[in-house]
Image (cartoon, rainbow, N blue to C red):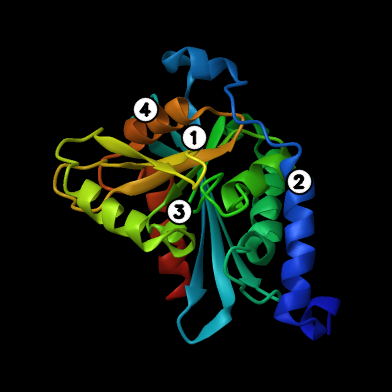
Amino acid sequence: MSDLDVKSDEELTEEFIRLQLELRERLVTEDTEEWAHSADKLRLIGGLDISYDKTDSSRGCVTCVVLDATNDFEIVYKNNTFIQLTTRYIAGFLAFREIEFLVNEYQTLRQNKPEFLPQVWLIDGNGVLHPRKFGLASHFGVVVDTAVIGVAKNPYYLSFIDQSVKDEHKRQIHTLCSVGDRFPITNSSGEVLGVALKTAPDCKNPVYVSVGHKVSLNTAVDVVLKCCRYRVPEPTRQADIISRQQINK
């Protein structure tokens, strides 16, 4: 039994907040990579996702894919790993449940196929669109020191904002008519933490894009739109499809 197993949710929350704030000191929210200034230089884009066993939430499959953006988003690398999760989930601290497995996938790729190491990663989760501006995508980016974009399917941020803002969010969704339409998501101080972005013509619901690490929000939006054939961008969509197939075998 680990120390985490015997700690209360309150004790874990206190420890996790401290660690998040420490790591956040290293967060970069601006473009630092050469490809961000020249779209034709972006070739390799990674996707990571974990699917869980429906009958045992401690069992999962993590999938890492790398797609070639210059060749119709062909999958050039794929790896699946079955995992046993030992840290219980606490809202706002998903990274502490999943981060070690995502980092392991990154390290496996870097060691075995470094020629396919992505220039940027897309992760099904939030970056700075988070109560402490340090969600799973940012956590991963800082730990492995790579460019990351958070792309969430659900508006988790609604759980920590006022009801009036929630109502306004619902109203604004109806204003998203064309692919590329978006509206900013701000905190109580008016700081923009991300955007709700329409990525496909037939989808009513947007995705929620935020800076993970080493990219600006504008660049993050551009990359997500570049990757979308459907609502969810191809790197995370393919990782999700493959991991679900594996866990359901």
Foreground label between 3 and 2: 2
Image-quadrant location for residue 111: top right
Q: Earlier in the sequence, mark 4 or mark 1?
A: 1
| Position in image of residue 63 (x %, y %) | 53, 57
Determine the residue positioned at 25% across, 32% down.
Answer: 180
Residue pointed to by mark 3: 239
Cβ atoms at labels 1 and 3 below 8 Å apart? no
Question: SS of the residue at dot 3?
Answer: helix
Looking at the image, is mark 4 or mark 2 earlier in the sequence? 2
- Helix, strand or loop at disc 4? loop
Crowd band around label 2 with a 10 angstrom C-alpha radius: few (<14), some (14–19), many (20+): some
Q: Residue 9, which numbered label?
A: none
Give the numbered dot on residue 45. Answer: 1
Mark 2 and mark 4 in contact (Cβ < 8 Å)?
A: no
Mark 3 residue type = Ala
Q: Earlier in the sequence, mark 1 or mark 3?
A: 1
For marks 3 and 2, the one nearer the N-term is 2
Q: Which dot, 4 or 2, sits closer to the camera? A: 2
- Mark 2–mark 1 Cα distance, whole angstroms, equals 24 Å
* Residue 1 against residue 125 in the figure, above or below: below
**C-alpha distance separating marks 4 and 3:** 18 Å
- Quadrant into which the C terminus falls: bottom left
Q: Which residue is mark 4?
A: 71
Q: Residues within 10 Å of mark 3 (few under 14, many from 20)?
A: many
**Gap in angstroms between the C-alphas marked 1 and 3:** 12 Å
